[in-house]
Amino acid sequence: MVFEKYAAGMKMNLTRFLSLPHLKESMSPTDGHYVDAALSKMQRIRHVALNVPHWLAEIASLGGTQ
């Protein structure tokens, strides 16, 4: 799994951040987000693997994952 490549003690950089799948909380997959706006200014994008409508859905969605 992609997460196994990154030990907890490793420093995060932009390349590493963008190489990982992301979870986004928004009512619509097309809703803007401050992270995406900042990345857009750098002409970069992230891979949003899962979009959930509420933070409570994050708990159920991530249960049992690494």
Image (cartoon, rainbow, N blue to C red):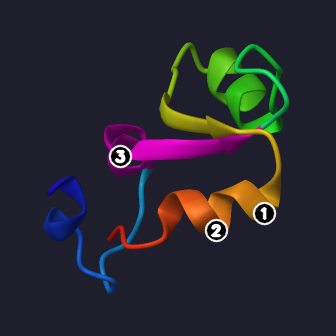
Picture quadrant of residue 27: top right
Instruction: Name above or below for residue 31 compared with residue 26.
Output: above
Mark 1–mark 3 contact, CB under 8 Å? no
Quadrant location of the C terminus in the rendered image = bottom left
Quick one: label 1, few (<14), some, or many (20+) residues within 10 Å?
Answer: few
* Mark 3 secondary-structure assignment: loop
For the residues labelled 3 and 2, the Cα–Cα distance comes to 19 Å
Of badges 1 and 3, the one in the foreground is: 1
Q: Which mark is residue 20?
A: 3
Q: Which numbered tag is attached to residue 56?
A: 1
Q: In the image, residue 52 lies at what x, y percent?
A: 69, 41
State yes or no: discs 3 and 2 in contact (Cβ < 8 Å).
no
Residue at image position (79%, 21%) is 28
What are the residue bounds of the magenta stretch?
14-25
Left or right? Give the position of 50 relative to 29: left
Membership of 26 in magenta stretch: no
Label located before the other in sequence (3 or 2): 3
